[in-house]
Amino acid sequence: MNLSVNQKRKLKQTRSLLIIGTMLGPIYIVFSDGFHNIIPFVNATIGAFLISCVIALLEIWLLEKGIRKLRFITLLFIRTLIYIVFITVIIVNVLVISRMIVNNNSYSDVLNSQEFQNYIYHEDFIILLIYSVVFALTINFTRMLSRKMGQGMLLSHIVGTYFEPVKQERIFMFLNVSNSKKISEKLGPLEFHKFLNNFIYDITGPIIHHGGIIYEYIEDLVVISWSIKKGIFEANCLRLFFAIQDEIEGIKEDYYISYGFSPQIKASIHCGNVIRAEIGDIKTQIVFHGDVMNTTSRILGKCYEMEKTFLASAHLIYRIEIPGIIESKSVGAISLKGKENEVELFSIEEKQVNTVV
Amino acid sequence: MKGHTYEGRKKKRAILIIGVSTFFGLIYPVLSREFGDKFAFINGITIGFLGGSFISIFELYIFNPLNKRIGFIKKLIFKSIVYLIFFVLLIVLLIAFTGSIETKTSFIKYLTGEEMQYFIFEEDFFLILQYTLFLTSAIIFTHQMSRKMGQKVLWNFVTGKYREPKEVERIFMFLDLNHSTVIADKLGDVQYNYLLNDVFFDLTSSILSTYGEIYRYVGDEIVITWKMNKGLKYANCFRTFFQSKYAIRSNREKYLTKYGFVPTFSAGYHCGKVIVGEIGDVKSQISYSGNVLYITSSIEKLCKKIDKEILVSEELIKRISLPEIYEMKLAGAIDQDDDISMDLYTISEIDMANV
């Protein structure tokens, strides 16, 4: 089976969520009941596994789109509420079924038995519930925070991966909305901000699906980066541009209704060595430093000069196996402002696919 | 004098941590439904309060300065051990203490007595310990993240304060390292990065103590912003620059031995209306946008061209009342949009010795 980058990413997330979630079950039992009985362990493991499945299903496969634009705190509460419902149902059922098996009783017998009623209303049940809800809340909070901070950033901050500067070879794409200056004048600053935010929301999906990480937004410029391996794989970094075009094309009517036009994009792409490091004390940022960034920015300037939509440097093009649907045309070697060496640039276009006669 | 906000911030943070932990200490007996037992409440609150105080002191005052020099795993293990020992001792001693009062026996007798043994090995002790340790890690995590993300950024994200973009009035300062391209070429990428990090570290307390907020780092440039009233008061926004200069000056030996020179800066100031709002889904930023930022940036660039340390726009000069220690001079002009030119002033400190 051939999986897209996006599906692989989702599967990976699901796997780690299931493993961590399932482990939390037995840990609870170690602390609360001790080791004398095997049944609570089995119950906790099964319960935790089922709960993790529900969370994974909801978080990773269902709730990916749609309600993302809600306020952080609202979203957190909605999620937690949904969790409480599911977790209660699962815990009660697991407990009942395990008693059914152990005591060889029917479902309603166990549910109505004195012992079970007692357990629900007077014993550990409420603590168990609180434990699960607190963990669900924590996991949610962390995941939402991690999303806000950008892919992989939360972990890098905690572990301090880039505490010491690291040299990396990476691909950078600078992407922006063409004629943004005019658009901003036409819409006014407040509306322009809303437009930009909408635009960024819409292009986030394609970026993640093509394995790119969003490095930063500078006004209307979005800086996207890949490790060489991920970017080159299936020409993901080139395909992203067309995926974004398609995405915007599909919803151009919405843009037209809200803002009176549908945005066109321009982008430049280049690769090379950069330093990646954590910087600052209060307000820490993980930043890329390097000439590559300046060069990529200059290539974007060339897009406007040469009236091209997507330019790539030779450094990158020579390393990518270009798929049939994409065409790269040399637009000549260009000396970039402030660079002694010339850089050959390629215009990247989609091949016109006509019906075969 | 313009209070020492760096210490002030720590105190505020400490009070917040103690408040939150006392609250959770109170919650525990409620959750475990020990309403009838007043000692359970006393225990809960005391553990919360003392635990919170310990976390504040440990995180803010003792461990904080060391934070940067220890790897993650070592730090994790070290902190876990410290907190584990602390909470085990705290819980056991406190329960024994209130227990001895409740049962009117001596402290030592209760501590070694059967009831205590029962509590530790059979009853809620492990649950309480787990509860406290979990909350401790949650508090530390939130504190650390909030610190990393910058002043109030985490809070603004959670409450969604800038979910809808707003128009606000702000002062902006672009602070730039002089001769940065030459320096970068000379030092090489990695060393240059160390230099920037050292500089940003040394500037932090100057920025905080003058109510500046770090908006972002762009290469070798820091963008700092103030709310109008905070920046204008005591000319705080200018003090940031001079305090930063002194901070670097007092560390000049370190820079000289490590990098072979002492960094200097130039700064451009301007103020006005900007749009502030959260932008982006993955990798959200709270971003400022508007013409004011462009103008501030070009003022800063002009600093280098006409060789001035500071350039301040007329707009800001009009609104600020300069303390006696500073004097201003007309230094140039810059084209605003629509070809209206705006005067720029430079600020310097008066030589106090000659007054």
Image: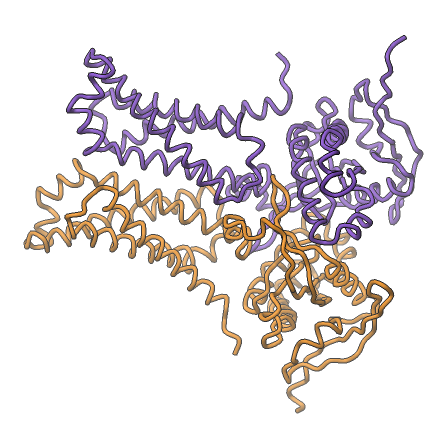
Q: Is residue B228 left or right of residue A101?
A: right
Please identify the quarter of the rendering in which residue B270 is found. bottom right
Q: How many discs appear?
A: 0
Please identify the quarter of the rendering in which residue B237 is found. bottom right
Please identify the quarter of the rendering in which residue B179 is found. bottom right
Q: Tell me, by letter, which chain the rendering colours orange.
A: B
For residue A118, say whether it is visible: yes
Q: Is residue A230 left or right of residue A354?
A: left
Among all residues in the image, which is located at the extreme bottom?
A: B355
Estimate the x, y position of residue A323 in percent, counting from the top left.
79, 19
The relative height of residue B118 versus residue A327 in the rendered view (above or below) is below
Viewer-closest of A319 and A206: A206
Residue found at x 27% / y 51%: B26
Among all residues in the image, which is located at the extreme top?
A: A357
Viewer-closest of A38 and B295: B295
Residue found at x 15% / y 48%: B36
**What is the quadrant of the N terminus of chain A in the image?**
top right
Q: Is residue B150 left or right of residue B82?
A: right
Estimate the x, y position of residue B258 in percent, counting from the top left.
65, 58
The relative height of residue A216 versus residue B62 in the rendered view (above or below) is above
Q: Tell me, by letter, which chain the rendering colours purple.
A: A
Q: How is the image coloured?
A: by chain
Residue found at x 15% / y 24%: A114
